[in-house]
Image (tube, coloured by chain):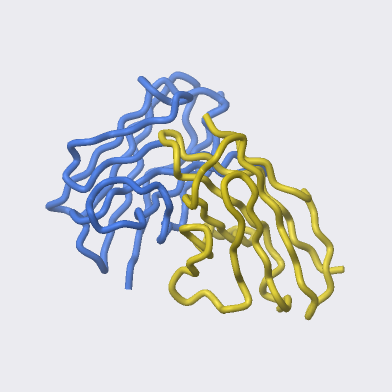
Chain colours: A yellow, B blue
């Protein structure tokens, strides 16, 4: 089973600034990497799949990058609605598909 | 517009059973694999199970293998998860999720999610 490790656990950023969330895989997952956003009491929402493809309706300020075992989600200019928990997920080696433990993005 | 409406959660005693349902609309149900993902209180996401569009292929996480059964009724556009031999560590919000690819086989990234249903296992 591939282990996904996110950092940091909590990220404090001011509105309008850039936020970067990191994700590391215990072995290569090629480009089979997705990112999700989850707000309290809500289901997760797909942001990015295939490493860097934005899902339908996702603003361009969200971008994904990386390769192999090291990945990054960048939010270029934080809006108030972006403060949430973010999860990375690998779907290269399955089952099981595995998620990172989450990064909480909070207002500084 | 895709809609996934879940039902069937609740409180159950250890060792008990429960069936979760997920009614789908807004897309060609048989063309997509479907999944269940769970989230224990205050914890992260855990993929639980997947089923191919035709229902011929089923896949399970080791943590629930032999206790949970995924199925689907394509005539009713409905996904199911039968939970047996429930344990306290099965307590979680369970989400159904529509797969990302249209070929009917799991790709394991999840484009659309149900609203979630809470399963609480406690005496």
- Looking at this view, is A88 or A104 the one in front? A88
Judged left or right of residue A107, residue B2 is left
Q: Position of residue B109 (x, y in %)?
A: 43, 52
Residue furthest to the left: B75
Q: Which residue is drawn at 44% across and 19% down?
A: B15
- Looking at this view, is B56 or B41 the one in front? B56
- Looking at this view, is B120 or B24 the one in front? B24
Q: Is residue B41 visible?
A: no
Q: Is residue A33 visible?
A: yes
The C terminus of chain B lies in which quarter of the figure? top right
The N terminus of chain B lies in which quarter of the figure? bottom left
Judged left or right of residue B123, residue A9 is right
Q: Which residue is drawn at 64% across and 59% down?
A: A40
Q: Where is residue A76 in the image (x, y as percent from the top left)?
A: 70, 75
Q: Which residue is drawn at 28% across and 41% down?
A: B51
Judged left or right of residue A13, residue B8 is left
């Amino acid at each position: 089973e591939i282990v996904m490790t996110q950092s940091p656990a909590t990220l404090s950023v001011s509105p309008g600034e850039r936020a970067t969330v990191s994700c590391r895989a215990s072995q290569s997952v090629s480009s089979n990497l997705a990112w999700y956003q989850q707000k309290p009491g809500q289901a997760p929402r797909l942001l990015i799949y295939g490493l860097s493809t934005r899902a339908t309706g996702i603003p361009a300020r969200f971008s994904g990058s990386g390769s192999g075992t090291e990945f990054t989600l960048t939010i270029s200019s934080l809006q108030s609605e972006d403060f949430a928990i973010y999860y990375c997920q690998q779907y290269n080696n399955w089952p099981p598909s595995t998620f990172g433990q989450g990064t909480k993005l909070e207002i500084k | 517009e895709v809609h996934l409406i879940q039902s069937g959660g609740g409180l159950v005693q250890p060792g008990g059973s429960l069936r979760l349902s997920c009614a789908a609309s807004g897309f060609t149900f048989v063309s997509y694999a479907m999944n269940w993902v769970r989230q224990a209180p205050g914890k992260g996401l855990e993929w639980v199970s997947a089923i191919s569009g035709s229902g011929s292929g089923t896949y399970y996480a080791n943590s629930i293998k032999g206790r949970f059964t995924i199925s689907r009724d394509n005539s009713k556009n409905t996904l199911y998860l039968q939970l047996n031999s429930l344990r306290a560590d099965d307590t979680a919000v369970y989400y159904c999720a529509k797969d990302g690819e249209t070929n009917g086989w799991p790709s394991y990234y999840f484009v659309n999610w149900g609203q979630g249903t809470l399963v609480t296992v406690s005496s």
